[in-house]
Image (spheres, grey):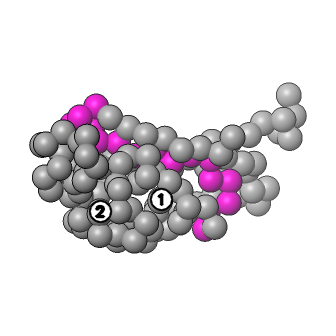
């Protein structure tokens, strides 16, 4: 099999702490109150290795871009972050994806979860 038939996938984990609440009418009373989570996620990039390096992209550079992107979410009330007025996992994943996409060629997937709840959402390029 030649290298042109192969595609690499690399992933970088991230985490942040944040609070949110759900204001919709049918939300559980507990979740209508401000409450916090330890959020964890990952970013997946797909592509071919750079011929001069042998890898898709420097992971430390990816880490710096992710950190810069999620900094507004860390220790924030997510409902107050522009674009996250209804901060369900799906919207958080999409918010991160949309901000990373112009900076990370080959971005294929962003996953965000609340491990203590056993919940996660994923948005990916089809």
Q: Please name the residue shown 21% across and 58% down the image.
A: 19
- What residue sits right under mark 2 in the picture? 78
Residue 105 shows in the view: yes
Q: Earlier in the sequence, mark 1 or mark 2?
A: 2
Quarter of the image holding residue 50?
Answer: bottom right
How many badges with numbers are in the image? 2
Mark 1 neighbour class, 10 Å CA radius: few under 14, some 14 to 19, many 20 or more: some
Label 1 with label 2: CB-CB less than 8 Å:
no
| Residue at disc 2, secondary structure | helix
Image coordinates for residue 76, horizontal then vertical, percent:
24, 67
Horizontal side of 118 relative to 32 (left or right) equals right
Residue at (53, 56) in percent of width and height: 97
The Cα–Cα distance between marks 1 and 2, rounded to whole angstroms, is 12 Å
Location of residue 9 (image quadrant): top right
Could you say where residue 26 lies in the image, as x and y percent from the top left? 25, 40
State the extent of the magenta-drawn residues as a range: 103-118
Whether residue 36 is in magenta: the answer is no
Residue found at x 53% / y 66% = 99
In this rendering, would 101 be left or right of 38? right
Q: In the rendered image, which quarter contains the C terminus?
A: top right
Q: Which residue is mark 1?
A: 96
Q: Is residue 36 above or below residue 77?
A: above
Report if residue 11 is visible in the image. no
The residue sitting at the top extreme is 1
Q: Residues within 10 Å of mark 2 (few under 14, many from 20)?
A: many
């Amino acid at each position: 099999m030649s290298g042109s038939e192969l595609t690499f996938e690399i992933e970088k984990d991230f985490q942040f702490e944040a609070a949110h609440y759900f204001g919709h009418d049918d939300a559980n009373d507990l979740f209508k109150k401000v409450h916090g989570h330890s959020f964890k996620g990952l970013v997946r990039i797909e592509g071919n290795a750079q011929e001069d390096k042998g890898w898709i992209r420097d992971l430390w550079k990816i880490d710096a871009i992710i950190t810069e992107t999620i900094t507004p979410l860390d220790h924030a009330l997510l409902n107050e972050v522009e674009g996250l007025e209804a901060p369900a996992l799906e919207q958080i994943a999409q918010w991160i994806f949309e901000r990373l996409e112009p900076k990370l060629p080959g971005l294929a997937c962003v996953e965000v979860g609340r491990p203590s709840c056993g919940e996660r959402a994923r948005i990916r390029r089809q």
